[in-house]
Amino acid sequence: MQKTLYLFANGRLYRKDNTICVEGEKERKYFPVESIRDIYVFGEVDLNKKFIEFAEDKEIILHFFGYYGNYVGTFYPREHYNSGYIILRQAEHYLDSTKRLDLAKRFVQGAVANIVQVLKYYQNRGKDLESYLYAISLLEESVSSVSSVEELMALEGNIRRYYYESFNTILDDTPFILKNRSKRPPTDPLNALISFGNSLVYTKILTEIYKTHLDPRIGYFHTTNFRRFTLNLDVAEIFKPIYADRVLFTLLNKNVIKEDDFENQGGVFLLKERGRRLYVQEFEDKLRTTFYHRRLKRNVSYQTLIRLELYKIEKHLIGEELYEPFVSRW
Amino acid sequence: MDLLSTLFSLEEELSKVIGSYVQAFFICPRQVWLMSRQVCPDEDNIFLQIGRLIQKQAYSRERKEVHIEHLALDMIKRGEKTLVIAEVKKTSKAIEAARMQLAFYLYELKNMGIEAEGELLFPEERKKEILILTPEWEGKVEKVKQEILELINQPLPPSPHRGRYCSKCAYAEFCWA
Ligand code: SF4
């Protein structure tokens, strides 16, 4: 029902009565505040405290991105769904190392299962990914037997290395090549695109966490320091392959985003505005797509699916049902 | 949030019964357990929004929610002999639950030394029902309060059961995720 507002151009963002006003160089647009769930700010946008207070009051989340399309931070309004009970459980599962490791493994297992689904999808479309699938399946078996989160991190890192290497096979009809995964700063277009997609997933999940009783600062796989958001990074492990990477492959294989959509700034690559718009469009299309949910007995969107995943985590924390991550079937 | 104070407020929460638990108890005990932990449903839920809208619009002139200790009364009026407390509902589908909730309010008020009569209002259906706290109602209320206390002190919520309320229940996404 509610929408995400993406601001690419430079301009001003302010409150006008009960609407959100976006003022660019050429035009001015008004959005009823109830219709907006979150706002992504990419451009050089001016906003004032009055607007922040408005966002706080209306429970609108603001995600800010820098010049390179890099994630800068989030304005996360005061929690509105407060359940002391859930927070206690969340802390309990963090402090108890067995419980923490168990949850962390579940996130990694979900991530690997979805990675495998992505690879199988392209395998069925004629890409020779057998060796990657084999290598990953071997590593996958060890996930259940690691004895610490650090070991799990290392194992997951190895799996990801194979996975990212496979991008070159999946994208062999395109001019794009991934030499090494380099996050900050991205040193080639593909890295820029991966990072961009990942940060969209991280922030989307954060937006959905806001609608639940979970505290985003307590994560299990990613290290918590109670100051940064980490739970969304954990949950993103599961969704990145199907939400971000699939979008990336579609856009590049169909030649929608091209080499000249990137700018090289002294070895650092960034996606230009046109590319960002195209990416976001494809990403939003994906989130709006619906499918039949058997337990809920109705159609749900991929956006809602994130929320359902968070509810499953809450049920795990309560002790009601062990968390089984969502695994894509297509 | 300070975890220690959270812990204490949680203990307090699990030691008292409030009106909304009584109402929910008859619809689905699972709801009550979740409510007692403030695992409230997502407010985007369309049925919740409609319910809230009706509550806001109906009787907007005389309507003021009144809080007395742990009770949140929809409306208080001066009757001929006693006070009248009214409870507004969207539909009469769960009328038994609504009656029990109102009886619970009357019972709790009586224990505070306040005598009152009850009115159930269904603005959409233009229906109204009077409820007087009889000894029989008192017995029922006591029994329900006991059952609810036992329920919320269980370590786990009752499992979800698919019933006729699920399809419009705001907890459905949580239950069937
Ligand atoms: S969805 Fe069904 S089982 Fe769950 S709380 Fe609502 S009525 Fe109860």
Image (cartoon, coloured by chain):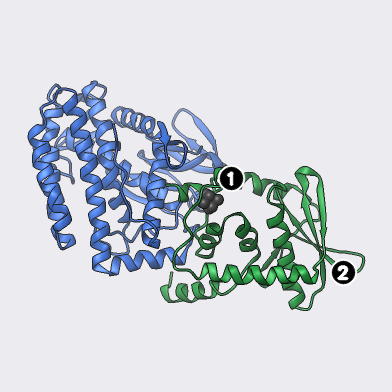
Chain colours: A blue, B green
For the residue pair A99 and B133, the one nearer the viewer reads as B133
| Residue ID at (32%, 41%) | A200
The residue identified by callout 1 is B164
Q: In the displayed structure, does residue B76 sit left or right of residue A53?
A: right
Chain letter of the residue beneath label 1 in the structure image: B
From the viewer's perspective, is the residue at label 1 or at label 2 nearer? 1
The residue under the point 26% across, 51% down is A107
Residue B169, placed above or below residue B74: above
Q: Which chain carries label 2?
A: B
**Residue A52 picture location, percent across and down:** 48, 51
How far apart are the two marked residues, 1 and 2, measured between alpha carbons?
Answer: 38 Å
Is residue A264 visible in this depiction of the protein?
A: no
Residue type, numbered disc 2:
Thr
Q: Can residue B140 be seen from the camera position used here?
A: yes
Sequence order check: which comes first, mark 1 or mark 2?
A: 2
Whether callout 1 and callout 2 share a subunit is answered: yes
Question: In the rendered view, would you say B156 is above or below A301?
Answer: below
**In the rendering, at what x and y percent does residue B125 appear?**
78, 43
Residue A263, quarter of picture = top left
Residue at 46%, 55% (x, y): give it.
A77
The numbered mark at residue B82 is: 2
Residue closer to the observer: B164 or A49: B164
Local secondary structure at mark 2? loop
